[in-house]
Image (cartoon, rainbow, N blue to C red):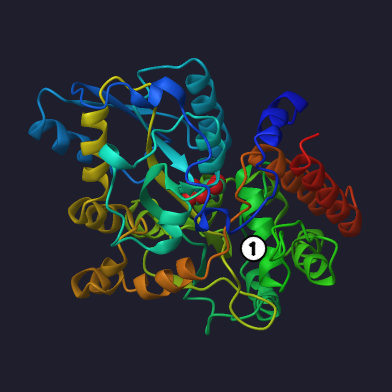
Amino acid sequence: MKTPKFLLPIATAGVLALTLSACGGGGGGGTTAGGDAEQGLDSRGPITYVQGKDNSNVVRPLIEKWNAAHPDEKVTFKEQTDQADQQHDDLVQNFQAKNANYDVVSVDVVWTAEFAAKGWLQPLKDKMALDTSAMLKPTVESASYKGTLYAAPQNSDGGILYYRKDLVPTAPKTWDEMMSMCSIAKENNIGCFAGQYAKYEGLTVNTSEAINSAGGSVLNAEGKPSLNTPEAKAGLETLTKAYADGSIPKEAITFQEEQGRQAFQNGKLLFHRNWPYVYNLAKTEGSSKVKDVLGMTALVGADGPGASTLGGHSAGMSVYSKNKATALDFLKFLTSEETQKFYATQGSLAPVLGALYDDKELVAKLPYLPVLKTSIENAVPRPVTPFYPAVTKAIQENAYAAIKGEKTVEAALSDMQASIESASAGQ
Ligand code: GLC
């Protein structure tokens, strides 16, 4: 995917800087989708909604509800796998083929820039505008590109440290505190800590969290990679050392979200980094061994709470959709207060509507909501760039090699730096 052909058109369009503030305004869209964005705006009819595996069992009930109320504009669910990278590649292939049947698609926050720059997402402005005033700012920013909204914020995501309340007397606040509790895991013959370390998007999430939580950053304030720093080194070292000494169990090198969740639910981990969706499943699945001992706290950092990577998904409308008026109504349905409450209560998915985090009824049911809101508001976005596939590849491959001990931490970080620089130089 990191080919000159991919990078060149974007580079010539002048979108060179990797920047965290790219969505702050100005630019007014920058890209046009050509004629496709003008087509089908008033048309109604059946549409398809494409999303990754519905682990939380929320999509089907929502679609049933929509379909009952819209017999002539029914939504069909096209379910992808549960792996972030496969979901991305499937969307890219279908956009490239101009597939009119991928009407509304779930867009990971890190794909917005790429898909918008390619002209695949219908800009949500003018006639297609969507009101985002009640939504958390980071969710709106991560669904925007160059000041234009390209997708409807749908679920936010912030990392959470799950732990075993029965074995951990007081939740740790720092990485060292957590590591000092690994003796408890040993005594109980279980793994100490795991996040997601397979070579895919989740490893970029976990690597960025390790770096940010140690006071470093993937990009500096100017939007340039800043990986050759003592803080970034200290951050990546937390993972490499813990993997080398077994505090992170060896099998975690194959973990995506679902494998980690299973290990934790099966009682095989003392601490587990994952997203909020785990709460509902760990509490309700029959096979869960941690139902009554589920602790949740902020991620840990060097001197106090760590910094989560901002995750989440937005619902984007394909420019190739033939029924955009229906698609827009469906986006509004997905972002409505009722749907957002349903996502939270049914799937413990993080709402995009700020007020729901203070909603008494909801907080009574999901007591961690205020903590989650803080996590999301302080979460660090991943680089915002149309060349994101090359950037994430640089982070994943080098972090993976360092964790496995195949590269030193210094070499991994300096290779990451070089690859991100060359991706942003449009080579
Ligand atoms: C979650 C997050 C998403 C992230 C992915 C990595 O789905 O919401 O932002 O990229 O995990 O696996």
Q: For the residue marked with disc 1, what is the amino acid?
A: Glu
Q: Is residue 300 left or right of residue 219?
A: left
Instruction: Please give the name of the residue rendered at 42% of the width and 59% of the height, measured from the top-left corner.
Output: 276
Instruction: Identify the residue position indicated by label 1 in the image.
Output: 209
Can you see residue 302?
A: yes
The quarter holding residue 136 reads bottom left
Residue 62's x, y, as percent?
21, 40
Instruction: Please give the name of the residue rendered at 67% of the width and 40% of the height, measured from the top-left corner.
Output: 14
The residue lying toward the viewer, choosing from 231 and 363, is: 231
* Mark 1, other Cα within 10 Å: few <14 / some 14–19 / many ≥20: many
Q: Is residue 390 above or below residue 323?
A: below
Q: Is residue 362 left or right of residue 256?
A: left
Residue 313's x, y, as percent?
43, 47
Residue 72's x, y, as percent?
11, 22
The residue lying toward the viewer, choosing from 294 and 148, is: 148
Q: Considering the image in quadrants, where does the N terminus appear? A: top right
Residue 367's x, y, as percent?
32, 74
Instruction: Please give the name of the residue rendered at 21% of the width and 26% of the height, measured from the top-left corner.
Output: 42
The residue lying toward the viewer, choosing from 89 and 58, is: 89
Q: Is residue 101 above or below residue 152?
A: above
Can you see residue 278?
A: no
Q: Is residue 126 above or below residue 354?
A: above
Instruction: Please give the name of the residue rendered at 45% of the width and 73% of the height, measured from the top-left corner.
Output: 374
The quarter holding residue 113 reads top right
- Per the image, label 1 sits on a secondary structure element best described as helix
Q: Considering the image in quadrants, where does the C terminus appear? A: top right
